[in-house]
């Protein structure tokens, strides 16, 4: 299983020359700029995600998934940093299609069943990757989910972690780091070992939402008829097996029937989801 990649990375089979800095700066935005990140479309071949808030690990995650699975993800053409500005650049394949979010209201029950069947296959394949026996990003580095973020590096909160117990303790440290009540933290510290236990490190996308699933236009499907591409691997890594399901539940808006289809894609972790959602709401309320 390939788990490391040389950075800077430049693919050799480019559809055309990589965009210049000037072309990137003048390109139109694909989504709103946020958190030191800008995402632009350059010509018909490239999407570039860049900025001070961009981690090259997102690109490494896509390289890792493409190298070790058959899951359709955008091709990565380049990963590099600008030493003058400190900005990181991820140059990737431009995917032509619409998000599952925008298409959902027009889909029939049969359409939804077929799409969710594909998604189930892809996420099952992620879960079948051999466990590295740690919780962390590819290459045994810190986790990028915001629940493990601190202003200054703190391995006890950021990871990687050798055990689920250490990961649980990191979440409690984050709780008090964010100003959560000490006695509430101590109560959760007693409860967590009863709920969050016995979960193997499992490779996790980290943001299963319909906005991150692209339905390809028929003219852009490959010979195998692949119709979906999964994007936004920014927070991916080796998390406890419950993590994907719990985050998907946390992201639900409960305004349509998408919530009723989640269990068709991911194995449910009902108890873990209830406690996990409560923790996240307290952290960012």
Image: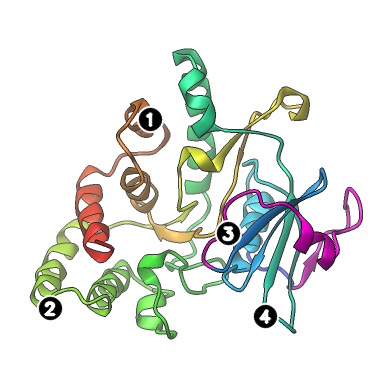
72 lies above or below 1: above
Quarter of the view holding residue 254: top left
Mark 4 vs mark 2, foreground winner is: 4
Element on which disc 4 rests = loop
Residue at 50% across, 51% down = 205
Q: Is residue 266 visible?
A: yes
Range covered by the magenta-colored residues: 8-35
Q: Which residue is mark 4?
A: 86
- Which mark's residue is nearer the viewer, 4 or 1? 4
- Position of residue 189 measured from the top left corner of the image (x, y, whole percent): 15, 71
The label on residue 33 is: 3
Q: Is residue 1 visible?
A: no
Mark 1 and mark 2 lie on one chain; the one further toward the N terminus is: 2
Q: Nearer the viewer, mark 2 or mark 3?
A: 3
- For marks 4 and 2, give the CA distance: 37 Å
Residue beneath the point at 24% across and 61% down: 285
Residue 219 lies left or right of residue 182; in this view the side is right
Q: Which mark is residue 182?
A: 2
Q: CA distance from mark 4 to mark 1?
A: 40 Å
Does the stretch in magenta take in 15?
yes
What x and y, as percent, mark residue 236?
Answer: 51, 58
Where does residue 51 sit, x and y in percent of width and height? Answer: 64, 69
- Determine the secondary structure under disc 3: loop
Which residue is labeled 1 in the image? Answer: 258
């Amino acid at each position: 299983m390939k788990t490391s990649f040389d950075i800077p990375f430049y693919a050799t089979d480019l559809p055309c020359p990589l965009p210049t800095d000037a072309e990137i700066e003048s390109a139109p935005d694909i989504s709103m700029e946020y958190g030191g990140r800008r995402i632009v479309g350059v010509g018909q071949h490239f999407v570039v995600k860049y900025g001070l808030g961009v981690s090259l690990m997102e690109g490494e995650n896509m390289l890792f998934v493409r190298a070790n699975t058959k899951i359709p993800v955008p091709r990565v053409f380049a990963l590099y940093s600008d030493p003058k500005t400190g900005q990181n650049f991820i140059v990737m394949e431009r995917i032509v299609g619409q998000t599952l979010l925008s298409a959902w209201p027009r889909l029939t029950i049969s359409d939804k069943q077929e799409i969710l069947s594909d998604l189930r296959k892809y996420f099952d394949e992620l879960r079948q990757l051999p466990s590295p026996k740690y919780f962390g990003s590819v290459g045994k580095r810190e986790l990028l989910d915001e629940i493990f973020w601190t202003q200054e590096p703190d391995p006890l909160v950021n990871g990687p972690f050798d055990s689920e117990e250490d990961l649980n303790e990191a979440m409690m440290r984050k709780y008090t780091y964010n100003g959560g009540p000490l006695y509430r933290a101590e109560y959760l510290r007693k409860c967590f070992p009863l709920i969050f236990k016995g979960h193997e490190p499992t490779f996790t996308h980290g943001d299963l939402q319909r906005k991150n699933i692209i339905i390809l236009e028929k003219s852009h499907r490959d010979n195998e008829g692949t119709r979906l591409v999964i994007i936004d691997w920014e927070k991916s890594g080796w998390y406890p097996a419950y993590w994907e399901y719990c985050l998907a539940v946390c992201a639900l808006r409960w305004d349509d029937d998408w919530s009723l289809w989640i269990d068709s894609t991911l194995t449910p972790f009902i108890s873990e989801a209830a406690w996990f959602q409560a923790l996240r709401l307290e952290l960012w309320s």
